[in-house]
Image: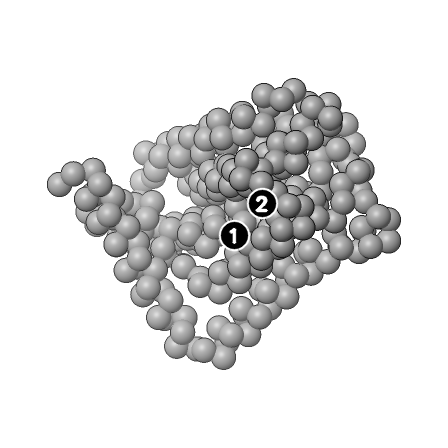
């Protein structure tokens, strides 16, 4: 079997497991519809402050509504993709406590895909569609050309790598804490998404350093957006900095995978 055939086979398994999860959720269709509408309303509520700020103050540190919408759409799309495809890792603590990992380790399939598809929630498509819709409108209003759209795509792809790495680090921590550190992960995912809805320049200097050098969320959407808008140097940053976005985000993913497999090596089963 070639590498391509092996990857295709694993993806078929992922889709099969995800489909089983979807069918189980669709047994309660009214509940599913209500939760989907609630999710959509929540993400609309997340975007509403951006509109209100620009509606009453005109711009935010020189960023107009369309440009802020682009920031929101980029980071929102990245996190929505990760939340949709790696949902099982967000609940990894419960998986460990229930002893489900033991069963999956016995299967001759890639463990990451088994965990990722464990709690697949199609209602999360609402979050992704909303972010894509906002991004499409922002790109049209800003009249972005092909080069700029390339930077947007690069930022979204980098964001997927970044948030996937964060989710893996969070899952790895469960091997030692069994759910006691889940809120720390939420700070970096949900909290990070909310923080990066706005330009880094509006924050205090110490927090800017955190977002650039500590937890490099700025490389998810801020620097790629500056490049897309051709404002990198005008904002006081070197022209080459946005090119580091895929590298930085890839390093975060590599760190996450390293931590997860390190935790897996120390796992001693539940004894069930």
Q: Quadrant of the N terminus?
A: top left
The residue drawn where x is 62% and y is 25% is 213
Q: Could you tell me if residue 132 is visible in this image?
A: yes
Q: Is residue 237 left or right of residue 186?
A: right
Task: Estimate the x, y position of residue 267 in percent, counting from the top left.
Answer: 34, 39
Residue 117 image-quadrant placement = bottom left
Residue 240 image-quadrant placement = top right
Task: Estimate the x, y position of residue 63 in percent, counting from the top left.
Answer: 76, 41
**For the residue labelled by badge 2, is the local secondary structure a helix, a strand or a loop?**
helix
Frontmost of labels 1 and 2 is 2
Label number found at residue 80? 1
- Name the residue nearer the viewer: 23 or 93: 23
The residue drawn where x is 52% and y is 46% is 78
Name the outermost residue toward the left: 1
- Name the residue nearer the viewer: 231 or 220: 231
Which residue, given by chain and number where applicable, does mark 2 sit on?
A: 74
Image position of 123 with respect to 228: above or below: below
The residue drawn where x is 49% and y is 79% is 30
Image position of 17 with respect to 198: above or below: below
Task: Estimate the x, y position of residue 263 in percent, counting from the top left.
Answer: 38, 35
Q: Badge 1 local density, few (<14 within 10 Å), some, or many (20+)?
A: many
Q: Badge 2 local density, few (<14 within 10 Å), some, or many (20+)?
A: many
Task: Estimate the x, y position of residue 259 in percent, counting from the top left.
Answer: 42, 32
Color scheme of the displayed model: one colour
The residue drawn where x is 36% and y is 57% is 118
**For the residue labelled by badge 1, is the local secondary structure a helix, a strand or a loop?**
helix
């Amino acid at each position: 079997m070639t590498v391509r055939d092996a990857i295709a086979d694993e993806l078929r398994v992922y889709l099969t497991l995800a489909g089983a999860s979807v069918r189980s959720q669709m047994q309660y269709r009214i509940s599913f519809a209500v939760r989907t509408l609630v999710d959509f309303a929540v993400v609309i509520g997340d975007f509403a402050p951006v509109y209100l700020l620009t509606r009453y103050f005109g711009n935010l540190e020189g960023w107009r509504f369309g440009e802020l919408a682009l920031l929101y759409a980029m980071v929102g799309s990245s996190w929505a993709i990760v939340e949709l495809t790696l949902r099982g890792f967000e609940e990894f603590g419960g998986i460990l406590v229930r002893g489900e990992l033991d069963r999956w380790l016995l299967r001759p399939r890639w463990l990451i895909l088994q965990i990722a598809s464990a709690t697949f929630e199609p209602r999360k498509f609402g979050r992704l569609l909303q972010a894509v819709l906002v991004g499409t409108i922002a790109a049209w209003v800003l009249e972005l050309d092909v080069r700029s759209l390339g930077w947007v795509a690069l930022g979204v792809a980098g964001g997927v790598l970044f948030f996937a790495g964060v989710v893996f680090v969070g899952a790895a921590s469960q091997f030692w804490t069994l759910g006691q550190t889940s809120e720390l992960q939420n700070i970096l995912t949900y909290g990070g998404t909310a923080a990066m809805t706005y330009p880094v320049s509006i924050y205090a200097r110490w927090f800017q350093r955190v977002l650039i050098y500590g937890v490099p969320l700025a490389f998810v959407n801020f620097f790629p957006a500056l490049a897309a808008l051709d404002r990198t140097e005008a904002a006081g940053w070197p022209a080459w900095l946005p090119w580091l976005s895929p590298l930085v985000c890839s390093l975060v993913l590599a760190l996450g995978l390293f931590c997860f497999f390190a935790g897996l090596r120390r796992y001693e089963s539940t004894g069930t």
